[in-house]
Image (tube, coloured by chain):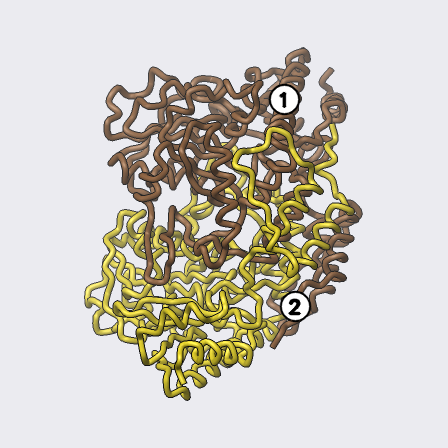
Chain colours: A brown, B yellow
């Protein structure tokens, strides 16, 4: 009963490529989706034509010259090609029998990445929220922790993981830049998991990683800034991370992967994996970590690292760090604007000195160029250096136009 | 600083398609992956050529005529095309600003699917393990449950979710077919989440869904059999599911999606979502459920349902149910083989009457045609009707050859 919809269809897939190539023209004509599931189908080709203006044309443009708002990067085409391959072979990494090569590729990419963090191994997960949950689950099992302490600027997933795991959650004060105040860390951490953040969401601050090892378990949430370890120029920003018990890194941020791609690493991976594994009658290998079956997200990650090498990856991250510094300098030199602090990991937080104009300025900037964040009850504009196509000149011009429109300068 | 690796590259992507088209020839020449991350990159094109024999050629062939071993289906090309689009636009569904259309598409596909299960809403997750964890988390918050009871044939993720959530886990006895023995369900379920399975992993059995509503919270793990609700011929197999408080369904099983695609639905979605939401200073909308940011897995699911309609989807599931029945009849009619039971949801469990030949027969069958499972301490062969390209004749011929080689008949 061979079904042609499950076969390689060169014409249909070429049409999908063509529609991608023309995506900048789309958007306006995007139809609304039917309110109910159709009883009869449109067929594959008509579905592509119907969906392209919405899925491609109306998507947020993360790779525009002025896009600098979020930790979500555009993605290199090598990840599109290999994600396409993944979808077509649909390997399930749960069983060696269903994913002979893809499992090997995941082990390989984890082997490549662990030395940068001083860890011994780990596994891939769909994002750092699951990575943080996995790490704190291991902390509960391996170190018997009863509570989790973390800077109040930590990602909300840290408190969420503690809540899910039935652990007490104790946020600690942070300084004005967003980093944990080291003196606020309790003396007695014998039953505590200490979570340190390398690159907070709001300001990109890095907690004092020399605190690693002070608690029964130290987890570093390096979702954002973790990839700086691949850069010879910036690895030192995360010095001390090698003293952690576990590390979370999002590959769909500064490693430019499509969502959902992240990894969790452990100093003693064999022990941690053993503590968070469940078996089953039908399983050739136990279920390691929170997920059961999972897909081959390691394939585009390995492909990217293979295509660029460590150096090509680091060059892109270094360029983004430089762009953030240059933007910060520009803001610093502007007598009507206020910079929160020089960026530590590519996050630039600033606002007009006339703070009543923060929201109007945000509204006047091109869509996707800025985001807003709350710090100490006040609104700030926030830029994140995640887009390798960013052009500071284009951004600066747009900013001048917006400022002039608001009567600033 | 426009980076060409982040641009649409027609030639490179066409080459990726070409390599897919020729994948059957690959495999033998697959190189091993470098032990360490390369310092300098190979470039994109060379990386595609290097990886294709491994990623495409050595992948487990889920769409072969004899492939009938696991709950992992081959995928239709419409999902490859739309997954490619997703990778290229990389929308993050956390923020309306970063995924204006993709968020709408997720809401729409959930709206399409909820009526089949009598639920009011829900959200997408990377698999039914996370769906089960999410549902039991909601049960803990909304109904204050302290323990989880479930048939001992339930998926291991149910016990795992209870463990993560700090809930007592109490497996109950199942009958020979794998379904929960209704009499074994405790009378007092006022502080209990009852998990019923629609399609157990080992045998595809469906628990008595008229038990829905007996406990403080009833969750139906319909990871495998959920999509039968789209079939007019087979929807009745899951009658009673509309009385559940939550339902988990894997779209990467009988809805033919690439991994990782699943959804969790709630009878009172507003209340459940409210109980499992976390906010953050930088968030325009709260984080609903276990994950933080997530990708646009609803796009290929909506595309598939749009291309096929309810009818085209149901036709494929119905054909697979028929194929499982025919295989079961074939085994039943063979005087040297034993069938566990007629399949309820497309899972066929059988073995040679000479049980010392079970493992040799498994080894003699084509790779990917059968799996093995343990039931009551004994080994059985297991087939799963997940592959629309399955050909019973090809399977029967391979089985005859294997049996003859073992001296059976």
Dot 2, how many residues are within 10 Å of its Cα: few (below 14), some (14-19), or many (20+)? some
Location of residue A144 (image quadrant): top left
Quick one: quadrant of the C terminus of chain A?
Answer: top right
Q: Is residue A248 above or below residue A284?
A: above
Percent across and percent down for residue A257 are 59, 40
Dot 1, how many residues are within 10 Å of its Cα: few (below 14), some (14-19), or many (20+)? many
Q: Is residue A72 left or right of residue B343?
A: right
Q: Earlier in the sequence, mark 1 or mark 2?
A: 2
Give SS at disc 2: helix
Residue at coordinates 55% horizontally, 26% vertically from top-left? A230
Chain bearing tag 1 is: A
Residue at coordinates 52% horizontally, 24% vertically from top-left? A203
Please tell me whether mark 1 or mark 2 is closer to you in this view: 2
Percent across and percent down for residue A385 are 62, 27
Give the residue pinned by disc 1.
A324
Residue at coordinates 26% horizontally, 34% vertically from top-left? A143
On residue A5, the disc is 2
Quick one: quadrant of the N terminus of chain A?
Answer: bottom right
Q: Is residue A112 left or right of residue B354?
A: right
Q: Is residue B299 above or below residue B183?
A: above
């Amino acid at each position: 009963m061979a079904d042609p919809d499950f076969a390689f269809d060169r014409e249909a897939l070429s049409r999908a490529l063509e529609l991608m190539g023309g995506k900048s023209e789309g958007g306006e004509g995007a139809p609304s989706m039917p309110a109910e599931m159709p009883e009869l189908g449109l067929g594959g080709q008509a579905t592509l034509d119907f969906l392209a203006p919405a899925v491609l044309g109306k998507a947020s443009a993360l790779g525009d010259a002025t896009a600098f708002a979020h930790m979500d990067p555009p993605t290199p085409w090598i990840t599109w090609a290999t994600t396409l391959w993944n979808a077509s072979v649909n390997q399930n990494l749960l069983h060696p029998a269903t994913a002979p090569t893809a499992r090997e590729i995941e082990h390989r990419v984890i082997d490549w990445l662990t030395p940068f963090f001083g860890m011994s191994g780990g596994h891939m997960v769909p994002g750092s929220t699951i990575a943080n949950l996995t790490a704190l689950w291991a902390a509960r099992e391996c170190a018997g922790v009863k509570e989790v302490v973390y800077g109040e600027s930590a990602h909300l997933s840290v408190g969420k993981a503690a809540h899910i795991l039935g652990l007490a959650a104790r946020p600690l004060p942070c300084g004005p830049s967003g980093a944990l105040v080291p003196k606020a860390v309790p003396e007695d951490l014998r039953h505590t998991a200490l979570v340190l953040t390398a690159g907070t969401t709001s300001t990109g601050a890095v907690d004092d990683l020399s605190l690693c090892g002070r608690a029964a378990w130290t987890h570093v949430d390096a979702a954002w800034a973790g990839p700086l370890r691949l850069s010879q120029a910036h690895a030192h920003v995360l010095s001390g991370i090698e003293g952690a018990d576990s590390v979370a890194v999002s590959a769909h941020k500064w490693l430019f992967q499509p969502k959902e791609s992240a990894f969790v690493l452990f100093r003693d991976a064999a022990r941690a994996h053993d503590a968070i594994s469940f078996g089953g009658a039908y399983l050739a290998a136990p279920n390691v970590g929170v997920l059961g079956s999972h897909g081959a997200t390691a394939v585009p990650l390995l492909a990217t690292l293979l295509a660029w090498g460590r150096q090509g990856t680091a060059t892109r991250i270094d360029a983004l760090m430089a762009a953030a510094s240059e933007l910060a300098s520009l803001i610093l030199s502007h007598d009507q604007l206020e910079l929160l602090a020089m960026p530590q990991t590519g996050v630039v937080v600033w606002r007009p000195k006339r703070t009543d104009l923060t929201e109007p300025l945000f509204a006047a900037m091109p869509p996707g160029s800025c985001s807003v964040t709350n710090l100490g009850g006040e609104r700030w504009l926030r830029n994140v250096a995640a887009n390798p196509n960013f052009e500071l000149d284009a951004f600066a011009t747009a900013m001048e136009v917006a400022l002039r429109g608001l009567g600033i300068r």
